[in-house]
Image (tube, rainbow, N blue to C red):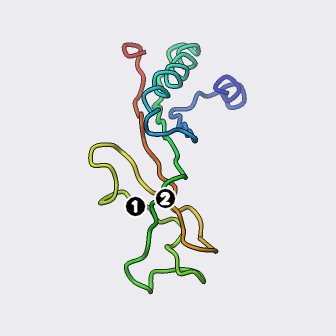
Amino acid sequence: MLVEFKDATKFKPDRIIFYRDGVGEGQFCEILSKEVVAIRAACKSLGNYQPLITFLVVQKRHNTRLFCGKKTDTTGRCKNIPSGTVVDNIIIHPSETDFYLCSHEGKKGTSRPTHYHVIFSKRFTTTNL
C-alpha cells in the first residue's frame, strides 16, 4: 500500500495511523512484535523513509457504558450521549494511552463507545529501524 500511495501521489506519507481490531489485551505484545516489525520493514524498503507510526487497537466488546451527567446533554429518543463524545480521563488506564469514543448516535438502547488503545506511536529513524 505504501508503494501504491507513493506512485499515485509522488509522496510518501509523513504519518501512518494503523487501526487493528479483534485483539485482546493479552495479545498486545505479540501484535507489536509481528505487525510493527512488518510495518518497519515496509518503510525500510522505501529507502530513508522515517514516518511517524501510530498503532491503535480498537475494542468494541467491553462492558463500559457512558451516560450524561445532565439530562439536557442527552440526545435522541433513548437519551444517550451525543455522537463524537470522547472520554480520555478518569475511567481510562492510569499508565497506558487509551480513550473511549462514541462515534455515532445510539438510536436504540444504551450507547456503547469504542475503546481505543494506543499501543505504539513513534517516528522511526535509521538508528531505531
Q: How many callouts does the rendering have?
A: 2
Q: In the rendering, at what x and y percent does residue 40 appear?
A: 50, 20
Tell me whether circle 2 and circle 1 mark residues in contact (CB < 8 Å).
yes
Q: Earlier in the sequence, mark 2 or mark 1?
A: 1
Residue assigned mark 2: 101
Decide if residue 40 is on the left or right side of residue 123: right
Q: Residue at x 43, y 44 (%)?
A: 117
Q: Position of residue 26 (x, y in %)?
A: 43, 35
Alpha carbons under labels 2 and 1: distance apart: 7 Å
Amino acid bearing label 2:
Leu
Residue at (50, 28) in percent of width and height:
31
Q: Position of residue 41 (x, y in %)?
A: 54, 16
Residue type, mark 1 in image: Val
Mark 1 highlights which residue? 87
95, 108: nearer the viewer:
108
Q: Nearer the viewer, residue 121 or 119?
A: 119
